[in-house]
Image: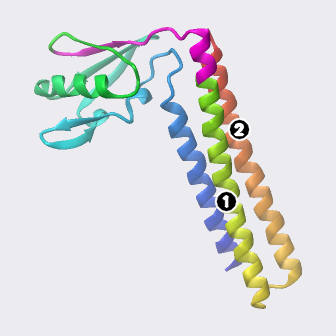
Amino acid sequence: MLKDILKDGENKMIAVVNSAKKALSGIKTGRANPALLDRITVDYYGTETPLNQVANISVPEARLLVIQPWDKSTIKAIEKAILTSDLDLVPNNDGTVIRIAIPALTEERRKQLVKIVKKEIEEYRVGVRNIRRDLNEQIKKNEKAGEISEDDSRRLQDEVQKLTDKYIAEIDKLGEAKEKEIMEV
């Protein structure tokens, strides 16, 4: 039962790290990356569908994304979805494919993006800490109910802290890598 509590907590922490990876991949760095378009959904015959499910997205050059829709009739809907997104990207449509040139980032914009990354990272760190708090409360509740001894409770809380430290360090590494990627000219 106690190992189940730890395993459940670790799975939740892994989920937070995976969410952090996904969120950070969507932040522009001045380089073309298909993950930039992950949040974009297209009106595909009346259904909001993720862009990567209606088109092939490729990166032929460092600053160019090419979107090739599987159904040519959706090209206008894809273009509209990109224009109305918060990504500030300008698609060029030639009738068969959409090309998106990724503009170089200014120094000021890079600094803004680093602030955004730091804010995102802190939110994910708080998420891991909240999981730690919940696990510790559950352990203390089991101790008060007499299901585990005080020594086992301390040992489990130490293990929970080790898990917390491990996953916060992973999140920090993700943030540092993203900041480095953003500041790279």
Q: Which mark is residue 130?
A: 1
Three-letter amino acid code of the residue under disc 2: Asp
Query: Which residue is more in the foreground, 96 or 144?
Result: 144
Q: Which residues lie in the magenta part?
A: 96-112
Horizontal side, residue 161 vs residue 97: left or right: right
Quarter of the figure with the C terminus: top right
| Quadrant in which residue 42 is drawn | top left
Magenta-span inclusion, residue 105: yes
Query: Which residue is more in the foreground, 136 or 96?
Result: 136
**Real-space Cα separation, disc 1 to disc 2, in angstroms:** 17 Å
Q: Position of residue 144 (x, y in %)?
A: 78, 87
In the image, what residue occupies the spot 39% across and 34% down?
38
Instruction: Quickly name the residue at label 2.
Output: 172
Three-letter amino acid code of the residue under disc 1: Asn
| Residue ranking furthest to the right | 151
Quarter of the figure with the N terminus: bottom right
In the image, what residue occupies the spot 18% across and 28% down?
77
Disc 2 on helix, strand or loop?
helix
Q: Position of residue 74 (x, y in %)?
A: 15, 28
Magenta-span inclusion, residue 35: no
